[in-house]
């Protein structure tokens, strides 16, 4: 596992009312959710980035109002037509 260090102003912790450890967990989750929403990472990879199980990541998506289903209407129609 790699460690990445970033410098943040002390004020970000008080603004979010979180300690550094909780802030970092939230930052990882927020990044993972956004990258998943943009289609840049899979659900499994996003869960790994967030440090969660896939089931817990899917639950977290609802908190951010992001659908766990990342299909366009055309992709869904194609998937359904292949099912016949």
Image: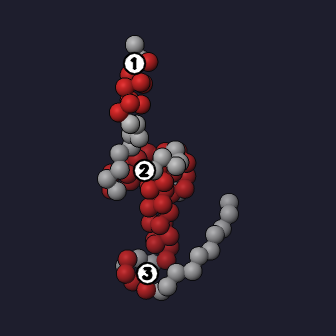
Q: Secondary structure at mark 1?
A: helix
Which residue was labeled with disc 2? 37
Tell me which residue sits at (39%, 83%) in the image: 14
Q: Classify mark 2: residues with Cα within 10 Å, few (<14), some (14-19) or many (20+).
A: some
Q: Residue furthest right?
A: 2
Q: Position of residue 4 (x, y in %)?
A: 63, 69
**Viewer can see residue 56:** no
**Against 66, is 13 above or below?**
below
Q: Position of residue 38 (x, y in %)?
A: 45, 50
Tell me which residue sits at (35%, 45%) in the image: 67
Q: Quadrant of residue 55?
A: top left
Left or right? Give the position of 6 relative to 65.
Answer: right
Q: Classify mark 3: residues with Cα within 10 Å, few (<14), some (14-19) or many (20+).
A: few
Q: Quadrant of residue 76?
A: top left
Which residue was labeled with disc 3? 12
Q: Secondary structure at mark 2?
A: helix
Q: Are marks 1 and 2 in contact (CB under 8 Å)?
A: no
Q: Residue furthest front?
A: 74
Q: Residue furthest top?
A: 84
Instruction: Identify which residue, 80 or 15, lies in the foreground.
Output: 80
Q: CA distance from mark 1 to mark 2?
A: 25 Å
Q: Position of residue 13 (x, y in %)?
A: 43, 81
Instruction: Identify which residue, 4 or 22, lies in the foreground.
Output: 4
Q: Which mark is residue 81?
A: 1
Q: Secondary structure at mark 3?
A: helix
Tag 2 or tag 1, which sits nearer the N-term? 2
Instruction: Give the mark toward the camera: 3 or 2.
Output: 2
Quadrant where the image shows the N terminus: bottom right
């Amino acid at each position: 596992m790699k460690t990445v260090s970033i410098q943040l102003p002390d004020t970000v912790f008080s603004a979010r009312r979180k300690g550094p450890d909780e802030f970092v967990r939230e930052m990882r989750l927020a990044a993972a959710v956004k990258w998943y929403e943009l289609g840049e990472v899979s659900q499994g990879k996003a869960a790994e980035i967030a440090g969660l199980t896939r089931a817990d990541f899917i639950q977290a998506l609802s908190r951010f109002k992001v659908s766990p289903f990342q299909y366009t209407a055309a992709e869904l129609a194609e998937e359904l037509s292949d099912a016949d």
